Structure formats: structure tokens, C-alpha cells
Image: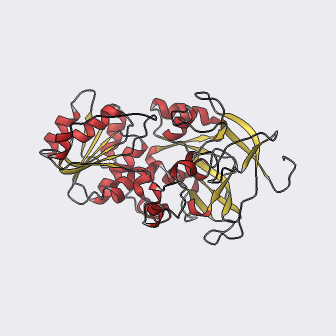
Amino acid sequence: MTNDPKRQPIRAAVARTAGQPLQFESATLEAPRDNEVLVRMVATGVCHTDMVIRDQQYKTPLPMILGHEGAGVIEQVGRNVTTVAPGDHVVMAYMYCGLCSPCATGHPAHCANMGPLNFGGGRLDGSSSACCHDGGELHDHFFGQSSFATHAIASELNVVKVPKEVPLELLGPLGCGIQTGAGAVLNAMKVHAGASFAAFGTGAVGLAALMAARVAGATKIIAVDVNSTRLQLALELGATHAINSRETDPVAEIRKITGGGADFTLECSGRAAVLRQAIDSVGLLGTCGIVGATPEGTEASFNVNDVMIPGRRIMGIVQGDVVSRTFIPELIELYRQGRFPFDRLVKFYDFDDVNQAMADSESGVTIKPILRFESAAA
């Protein structure tokens, strides 16, 4: 297969064994199908979910090319593709079917086929684009892209055309982590002017949510974390209050700050104990959103009467419940206006340093790593 002129040679970072570092391998991609595109990668973000799959906290088929915050340049399109063309700059987001009830009603992030399309290791029909250099099986289409490679095959559905005057290497995280936090605030929960909002966890998702709360006009914006450096950054990015939950009971403090409980809270840490705090911090008729990814089978508890009687709402949110094709350009425009400075969250790494970038993300050294490829010139 490696001599097939129709296949694109690539270099990919592959997850082969649960919990082990990614391995760099030579592989190939088949040509894009009728509704697909071939993207030359310029940069890709590293997200917590990449580590979740590497460690098999969510079970997926291995070996697999990970990566799902890709940004690049279209090199080839299938014959039925009409919305992008070779040379276009694109961000790749999550994949969805476009045909189920959630997709048809404007909620593609909650697609009925979200699992197999984003975590199944291939297309919905089970096929994959990638092939090992020796012809062996290699799973791809992680979030419809598998961007930890020099090239990726994506669908026309999950590529978003972006302006060429904005640095393309910066934009990949808008396709997952950043849109998840911002979308949860602006789209799913609809935080409004004058509201109170608290984010539990100040990683990329939580900080994006805090910045979005400021855009929405929330007047009490509360950051909760155990990392004092990140709490300071949260204050610089628009938080009005910062709570170190190792030093202070966040539930009591939020109730004190807001006069009874926040209108909105967002659990971004993926920890069941923190989710309980986020629920208990909500005021009358308030909403707690959940975006933190937990290991499969994780359960959490709450006092039923303390949810029912005050009319609290608990909302599961995937990808901010956004339509990426319209929401990502909105975030880019907010960034250009200086109202959404997500560039302050990022640190760039060479693609070869993917395992170090993952380690730095897990240790808290880096909020949002972005891998740059040698072919980054557009």
C-alpha cells in the first residue's frame, strides 16, 4: 500500500498501548472520499481527552492516531465538497452525522452517533483512512480527524473555514477545548448580563468559560481551583473572585459572594467530588453544567431534595452544544476585538515533542499545548 500513488504518506503519533507514550510512525492515508477533504496540518492542540484515550479511560480500538484540535490547509477535496476548496485555512471540530434528531434540531454536539463517529476509530461504516507502513491496521477519524499527523482526512461537515489573516497555528483549540468552555456559557446555559457564574477548574475549558462569562456580561465571575498561578490568570482574564478550594470551602464562599448561590456553575475538572460542590453552589432556579470528562463508569451523588426544592438544574454539555461552523468564527471575531484573549492560554511545542506536551498538560505546567508542524508555512 505504501507504493500506491493515490495514498498520502504521513508521519503520525500513534497510541498503541494503554498508558504508554505515543509512537511516531510512517503511515499512509487514502484519498478523500466524495464528502471528505485532505488537510495538511499546520498545528494541533493537545486536549485532556487525548490523554483519556491514550490511557484507555474511555475504551477505543488501538492502535489509533489521536489529536482532535487540528488546524491546517485544505490540499484536496472530494467531488461532492462545495463549502471549502484547496488552499483554504480550516479548523477541524467534532464529527456528527447530520441526520439524527439532535443534528436536525441544531444540536449536532449531542448527535445520536457521537460515540462511534468520534471514538470508534473510523467512519460510521467502520472503515478508516490510515494504514500502517507495513499494511497493518491503524485506526483514525478520532473526532473525525486524527490530527496528530502531518496530514488528516476529515469530512466537509467538521471543517470550519477561517480567515487567512488570523494566525492559523493558534486556532486549533477553538475546535474542542475553547469552544467547549465558551459554548457552555454562551450557548448551552445562556449566561446573561448581570448573572453570577462560577467555573470549577481553570484549565483551558474553565478559563474559556470565564472569558465567555465576561463577554456575556456576568457581573460576578468566580474561579475555583487549587492552582494559585491559574487563579491569578483567571483574575487577569475577567474573573471577579478567585477561590483556592484547598484553603477555603468553595460552596460556602460562593454562597457568601453571591448572596445565596450562583446563577450558573460549570464543572470542568472531571472529578465527582467537585461536581457535588458545583451543584451545591447553585442558587434558586440556577443551573450547573457538566463538561469535565470522567473515566467510564464514574458516578456522583447529590442531595435530591436540595436539587428539587430550589429548582436547580443539572445539565450535561458536550462541545458547548455549539454548531462549530458558526460559533468558531464568532470566537475568532471576539479574539480580533481583544474581548476573548485565548492566546494567553497557549504554549507552542514542536510536533516531535507531543509526549512532553502531554506531560506538561497533565502536570499543570501548560494550560493549552499546541503542536506545530514543520510544514507550517501556508
In the image: residue 66, left or right of residue 252: right
Q: Is residue 226 above or below residue 128?
A: above
Residue extending furthest toward the bottom? 82
Pick the residue in front: 45 or 305: 305
Question: In the rendering, at what x and y percent does residue 131 appear?
Answer: 76, 45
Position of the C terminus, as image quadrant, is: bottom right
Q: Is residue 261 above or below residue 155?
A: above
Question: In the rendering, at what x and y percent does residue 186 appear?
Answer: 34, 58
Question: In the rendering, at what x and y percent does residue 375 appear?
Answer: 70, 50
Residue 16 lies in quadrant = top right
**Residue at 41% across / 56% down in the picture?**
321
Question: In the rendering, at what x and y percent does residue 256 appear?
Answer: 13, 40
Q: Is residue 141 above or below residue 16?
A: below
Whether residue 205 is visible here, answered yes or no, is yes
Whether residue 225 is visible here, answered yes or no, is no
Residue 222 lies in quadrant = top left
In the image: residue 115, left or right of residue 248: right
Residue extending furthest toward the right? 3
Question: Coloring scheme of the render?
Answer: secondary structure
Pick the residue in front: 21 or 110: 110
In the image: residue 318, left or right of residue 68: left
Number of marks present in the image shown: 0
